[in-house]
Image: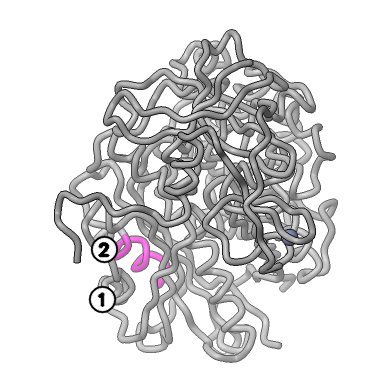
């Protein structure tokens, strides 16, 4: 049991966000070079249990994006906002682009970072254009 | 291997019934299907039931037993959950169980109550079909995820919002005469283009509505149909299922839906048909772009070429391959857990000739149902064929 007001962490995922907040983002790489994101016991691609935390590249390219106008309640005060899937090579990551949608396009170079939602102050993956 | 017939089909009016419980909705659809089939309730050996958000919308889990009770059937019942493909996967299991001789009579269906939630509440509930950690916490909504698929599609293959608007216009036109449909009215391309943005490039008229409703079909073995002299002129001859990574970020190319391609290939091989043999299809158009991806995965169009199918009149009522003659999710509505079996119920009637839109496909013999979960991390495809008497 936990105290009612004590938030329970999601093991693996929250450590990943902690690292991202410290500027030390990483991904999980298997012996065969497949990338994935934690928590992982085995590589989702090949099943290898030989996994290493590998530094996330300093920048990636927007693979696709949208501007969300109708949010879920947890993002009510954040909307409209731009969400993107960013390609870092061995791994792709989803987050909010800190830019106007007019300045975002597929292929845009961005850096991974960490932020909080406006609505509830919840932890959030963000991307800053380089 | 025993062959599987659809003996009966039932659908409630899809639309806004905020006060009706999912068990009540299913009672109506199931009773209609059982009556249509002409089977004795005592003969029903199982109830396979799809439901997605009962815990969130009604504070009700464990809905299988409620589904059997609602039908007055004394048989074990199981709830299946695969997001928007919930009743599609329930159907696949039932088809396999009848084929394997495990059962002669099964009721398969689904039910969903959604409009008792606020818009924000249903947006939040639908989002749980995505990856909570990596998508929902990044602000990805259900429309937002399909919007990112559309952005990627436009970039790789071209296409415009106007092409997508033609999909919505087509499906609305098909729903006009369908008494089960939520929106029995036509829309125009201009109205679709001018509707409010939901997640760019998708606007309100690119999206299916929030819907309450239920559907059911009665599956019987060929032997049972013959022994009991049932009028069951439609067979399910092929079933296939495909899977993909849950999150868009973990997929090679989000401008395609490989899980549905896999499901279609398996279902066609199972039925011994090819994409060219298909006369009509009901596909999972939760968003207009989803219909485009479905057409390509089902092999009706090459990758990147399905975008203009509606605009070119190929998939319209009088086109070479009518798609979503029921109105599709877009205009018929999308009560999530009920959608998969509603497609099969509609196709059964279209092939039998007693659907309001059967007049558009008088010679049709082969129909395909394509049901997708989430952003097509789950996909199930069934082939239906009219049986030669
Ligand atoms: Zn691997």
Helix, strand or loop status at disc 1: helix
Please name whichever residue, B201 or B220, is drawn nearer the observer in this view of the structure.
B201
Residue B70 position, x and y percent, is 26, 71
Please name whichever residue, B138 or B389, is drawn nearer the observer in this view of the structure.
B138
The residue to which callout 1 is attached is B69
Give the CA distance from mark 1 to mark 2.
9 Å
Residue B248, above or below B104:
above
Question: Do tags 1 and 2 sit on the same chain?
Answer: yes
Residue B32, above or below B287:
below
Residue A90 position, x and y percent, is 73, 44
Helix, strand or loop status at disc 2: helix
Please name whichever residue, B285 or B328, is drawn nearer the observer in this view of the structure.
B285
B298 to the left or right of A100: right
The residue to which callout 2 is attached is B23
B239 part of magenta stretch: no
Q: Which image quadrant for residue A101?
A: top right
Residue at the image position 36 percent from the left and 61 percent from the top: B29
Q: In which of the image's four quarters is ligand 1 placed?
A: bottom right
Residue at the image position 36 percent from the left and 22 percent from the top: A78
Residue B327, above or below A84:
below
Provide the major secondary structure of the magenta segment.
Answer: helix
A90 to the left or right of B162: right
Location of the N terminus of chain A by quadrant is: bottom left
Region of the chain picked out in magenta, as a range: B26-34
Do the residues bearing badges 1 and 2 touch, measured as CB atoms within 8 Å? yes
Residue B156 position, x and y percent, is 78, 27
Chain for numbered disc 2: B
Inspect this view and state whether residue B174 appears: no
B158 to the left or right of B351: right
Tell me which numbered mark, 1 or 2, is placed earlier along the sequence.
2
């Amino acid at each position: 049991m936990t105290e009612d007001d004590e938030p329970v962490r999601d093991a693996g995922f929250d450590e990943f966000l902690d690292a991202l907040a410290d500027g030390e983002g990483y991904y999980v790489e298997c012996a065969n070079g497949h990338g994935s994101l934690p928590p992982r016991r085995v590589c989702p691609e090949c099943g290898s249990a030989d996994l290493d935390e590998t530094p996330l590249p300093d920048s990636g390219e927007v693979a696709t994006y949208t501007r969300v106008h109708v949010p879920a309640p947890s993002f009510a005060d954040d909307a409209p906002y731009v969400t993107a899937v960013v390609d870092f090579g061995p791994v792709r990551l989803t987050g909010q682009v800190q830019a106007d949608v007019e300045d975002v396009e597929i292929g845009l170079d961005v850096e991974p970072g960490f932020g909080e939602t406006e609505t509830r102050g919840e932890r959030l993956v963000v991307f800053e254009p380089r | 291997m025993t062959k599987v017939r659809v003996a009966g089909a039932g659908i409630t009016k899809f639309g806004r019934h905020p006060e009706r419980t999912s068990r009540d909705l299913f009672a109506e659809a199931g009773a209609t299907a059982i009556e249509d089939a002409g089977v004795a309730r005592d003969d029903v050996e199982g109830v396979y039931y799809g439901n997605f958000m009962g815990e969130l919308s009604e504070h009700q889990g464990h809905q299988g037993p409620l589904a059997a009770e609602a039908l007055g059937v004394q048989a074990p019942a199981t709830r299946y959950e695969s997001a928007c493909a919930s009743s599609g996967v329930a159907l696949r299991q039932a088809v396999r169980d009848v084929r394997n001789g495990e059962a002669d009579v099964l009721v398969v269906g689904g039910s969903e109550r959604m409009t008792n939630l606020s818009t924000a509440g249903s947006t939040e509930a639908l989002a749980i079909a995505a990856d909570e950690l990596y998508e929902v916490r990044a602000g990805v909504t259900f429309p937002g995820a399909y919007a990112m698929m559309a952005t990627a599609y436009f970039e790789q293959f071209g296409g415009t919002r106007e092409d997508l608007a033609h999909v919505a216009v087509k499906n609305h036109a098909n729903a006009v005469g369908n008494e089960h449909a939520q929106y029995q009215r036509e829309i125009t391309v201009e109205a679709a283009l001018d509707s409010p943005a939901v997640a760019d490039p998708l606007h309100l008229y690119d999206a299916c509505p929030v819907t309450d409703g239920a559907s059911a079909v009665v599956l019987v073995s060929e032997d049972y149909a013959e022994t009991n002299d049932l009028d069951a002129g439609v067979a399910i001859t092929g079933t296939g299922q495909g899977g993909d990574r849950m999150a868009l970020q973990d997929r090679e190319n989000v401008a395609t839906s490989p899980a549905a391609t896999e499901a279609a290939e398996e279902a066609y091989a199972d039925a011994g048909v090819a994409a060219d043999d298909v006369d009509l299809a009901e596909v999972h158009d939760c968003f207009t772009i989803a219909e485009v991806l479905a057409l390509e995965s089902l092999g009706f169009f090459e990758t990147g070429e399905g975008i203009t199918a509606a605009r070119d009149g190929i998939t319209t009522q009088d086109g070479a391959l009518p798609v979503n003659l029921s109105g599709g999710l877009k205009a018929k509505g999308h009560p999530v857990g009920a959608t998969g079996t509603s497609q099969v119920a509609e196709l059964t009637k279209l092939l039998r000739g007693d659907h309001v839109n059967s007049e558009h496909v008088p010679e049709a013999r082969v129909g395909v149902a394509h049901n997708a979960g989430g952003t097509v991390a789950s996909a199930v495809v069934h082939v239906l064929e009219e049986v030669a008497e």
